[in-house]
Amino acid sequence: MFIDPDVIAKIAGPTLSLVLGAVLKKYTEARSRVVSFLGHVSAFTLQDEQHTVVHTHSVVVRNAGRRAARNVRLTHGVLPPNVTIYPPVQHSIERNSDGSGEIVLPVLVPKEQVTVSYLYFPPLLWNQINNNTKSDEGFAKIINVMPVPRPSKGVIAAVWLLAFIGASFVLYWLVRLAIYAL
């Protein structure tokens, strides 16, 4: 019985791309992925007799992965006394005698986002406060955020469909080449 190599390639291409896509998705998404970004930075001049200047900024920490992130730590060169965490989550603040410190979040569940807001006075500036963000899985990825509209579900589905078709096409020709090379 003779089996046409073209039939094998036509079946193997989409099948291999489906399996490869599932394996890659499992490998890349089955972990915690902590990201952090600067929410805002601002300065206010109060309308009092002294025209007091007050600085504020916020840092957003998000677990964009599929597993819980454990022991998320925001390290600080200078940890101001006025800190607010929203939404309220279990946390601890560890202050050192030199003014530095850490805010520790025991767990960030998948897709959870926490905003840490700071209020402080000059000469302290926002870039002197936060050092880094890390968890048991490693350092958080610091991202520069630019608000953009989210594409519709139809556009996302079309992109995935085109990616699947392209991967199937490439794997089809790789299987054909492999068959003819043997």
Image: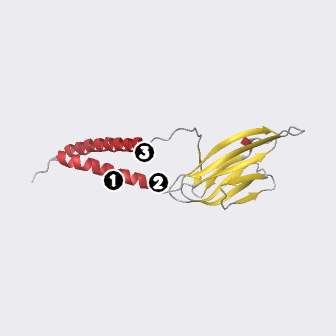
Residue extending farthest right: 49
- Residue 19 image label: 1
3D distance between C-alphas at marks 1 and 2: 15 Å
Residue at x 27%, y 47% (from the top left corner): 13
Residue at x 62%, y 50% (from the top left corner): 61
Name the residue beneath numbered marker 3.
153
Mark 3 and mark 2 lie on one chain; the one further toward the N terminus is: 2
Query: Residue 66 in the image: x percent, y percent?
Result: 50, 56
Q: Nearer the viewer, residue 144 or 48?
A: 48
Amino acid type at image mark 3: Lys
Name the residue beneath numbered marker 2.
29
- Mark 3 element type: helix
- Mark 1 element type: helix
Left or right, residue 25 beside residue 73: left
Q: Which of 77 and 152 is in front in this view?
A: 152
The picture quadrant where one finds residue 147 is: top right
Amino acid type at image mark 1: Val
